[in-house]
Amino acid sequence: MAGVIESEIGGVFVPVSNVETARDWYFRLLDRPIIGEILFGHLCVIPMKSGPALVLDSKGFVGPHCSKPAFHFNTDDVEAAHRHALAVGAAHLSPVQDRVFFTLKDPDGNLLMVADVPPTPRFEGGN
């Protein structure tokens, strides 16, 4: 099972109360054209020049980083990754949701996510 969960952060989540308003503000803050598509009615993935993508998420908004993971680990086999997390004794392991992701807690109670999502294309512009 070694290597099922990659040593790679795929996205940094920011909880927002209104995804469209937040998308527009972040694009303005970054001095970029507003091009981010709203996914599933509550997500907007903003590609960065390097590093993980910024993921704005308005689903179940209750405040900043309140009961939402701040990032996800990538996997290309979410079921195998889930079995691996179970085998290593991960706490508070959720079922695989939408055949795409699951959550778990680290020993300090930090909420983490493992997700099988395609990589976000990198922003190639000036900022």
Image (tube, helix red, strand yellow):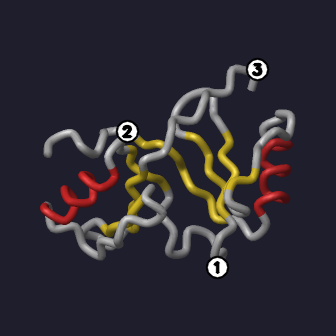
- Looking at the rendered structure, the kind of residue marked 2 is Glu
Residue drawn at (43%, 59%), measured in percent from left and top?
Answer: 99
**Residue at label 1?**
62
Residue drawn at (65%, 70%), measured in percent from left and top?
Answer: 59
Residue 29 percent location from the top left of the image:
81, 43
Q: In this view, does 80 lie above or below 32?
A: below
| Residue in the foreground of this view, choosing between 127 and 81 | 81
Label 3's element? Answer: loop
Lateral position of residue 43 relative to residue 27, left or right: left
Residue 58 percent location from the top left of the image:
69, 67
Q: In this view, does 75 lie above or below 22?
A: above
**Residue at label 2?**
8
Label 2's element? Answer: loop
Q: Which mark is drawn over residue 43?
A: none
Lateral position of residue 81 relative to residue 126, left or right: left
Q: Which is nearer the N-term, disc 2 or disc 1? A: 2
Q: How many labels does the image show?
A: 3
**Residue at label 3?**
126
Residue drawn at (32%, 69%), measured in percent from left and top?
Answer: 105
- Looking at the rendered structure, the kind of residue marked 1 is Val
Q: CA separation, marks 3 and 1?
A: 34 Å
Q: Which is nearer the N-term, disc 3 or disc 1? A: 1
Q: Which is nearer the N-term, disc 3 or disc 2? A: 2
Residue drawn at (76%, 60%), measured in percent from left and top?
Answer: 19
- Looking at the rendered structure, the kind of residue marked 3 is Gly
Residue farthest along the bottom direction in this orientation: 62
Q: CA separation, marks 2 and 1?
A: 28 Å
Dot 2 crowding, Cα within 10 Å, few <14, some 14–19, many 20+? few
Residue 44 percent location from the top left of the image:
70, 51
